[in-house]
Amino acid sequence: MTVCLDCGEVVESTILPLDLTAHTWGEWTEVTSATYLSEGLECRECTSCHAEETRVLPKLVPDEIISDPETGISLNTQQGVLPEGTTFEVDDVFDGTYFTLLNREVGNVESTMYNITPKADGENVQPDGWVLVRLPLPAGYDPANVNIYYISTETGVIERMDSYIEDGYICFQTNHFSVYAIVDASSPAETPTETPTDNGGGTSLSFFARIAAFFRSIAEWFRNLFNK
Ligand SMILES: [Zn+2]
């Protein structure tokens, strides 16, 4: 409050002091997008002195959950990332090529593989953005030692995904659905017996395991060759 010393009238100043240090900020531009697992970052620049300012974008929060009661698997996302009415199919993967690639990367450990296929109107669809996938931990898997791996047989790429454990689920995010493996690095896979005395299923399993072992020995030979 300002008071005139001559007449005692209360006057309000309408002239704000000129701030010479004020910047003329441009628009915020996204530097890193926020995801379900990490915060993002955006940046703006002063158009006169080119000073820069950054601010954190909070982690994404899912507002749409698509779940499969049979497997307990759920896709957690935001409106518009998957087409309206999307459901998904889950197939257990038994193809030996995937196990060969995985075992070459992580050794002969316990793993469970899923091929998750989102579908809308009968067509396979891929998300336009991030989806947080929650997979129930298979029985006997050690929560402290489980990891998620992305496997592509087309490119031979194996990639460990960032993941976390929550309420008996292992959670990771993806923007592309493919084959994912839950791997328990603490437990070696059961070694198949050389004498197939049981049914055909057991025989084919040990067949794939033998192929896996063969590829592992080749990989080992190459590692020794190049002393990697
Ligand atoms: Zn400035």
Image (cartoon, grey):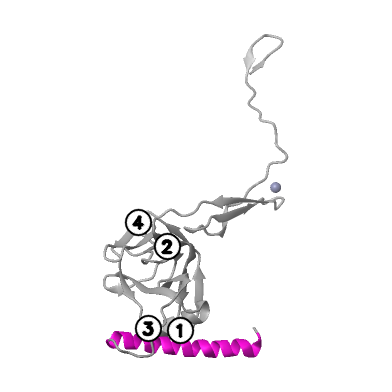
Front residue of 84 and 223: 223
> Could you say whether the residue bearing mark 4 is in a helix, strand or loop?
strand
The numbered mark, 3 or 4, whose residue comes first in the sequence reads 4
User: Can you see residue 212?
Assistant: yes
Looking at the rendered structure, which numbered label has been put on residue 95? 3
Image quarter where the N terminus lies is: top right
**Crowdedness of circle 3 by 10 Å Cα count: few (<14), some, many (20+)?**
few
The numbered mark, 2 or 4, whose residue comes first in the sequence reads 4
Image quarter where the C terminus lies is: bottom right
Q: Quadrant of residue 170?
A: bottom left
Amino acid beneath label 4: Glu
Q: Which residue is mark 1?
A: 100
| Disc 4 C-beta below 8 A from ligand 1 | no
Whether the residues at callouts 2 and 4 have beta carbons within 8 Å, the answer is: no
Amino acid beneath label 1: Thr
At 64% from the left and 11% from the top, the residue drawn is: 9
Front residue of 123 and 27: 123
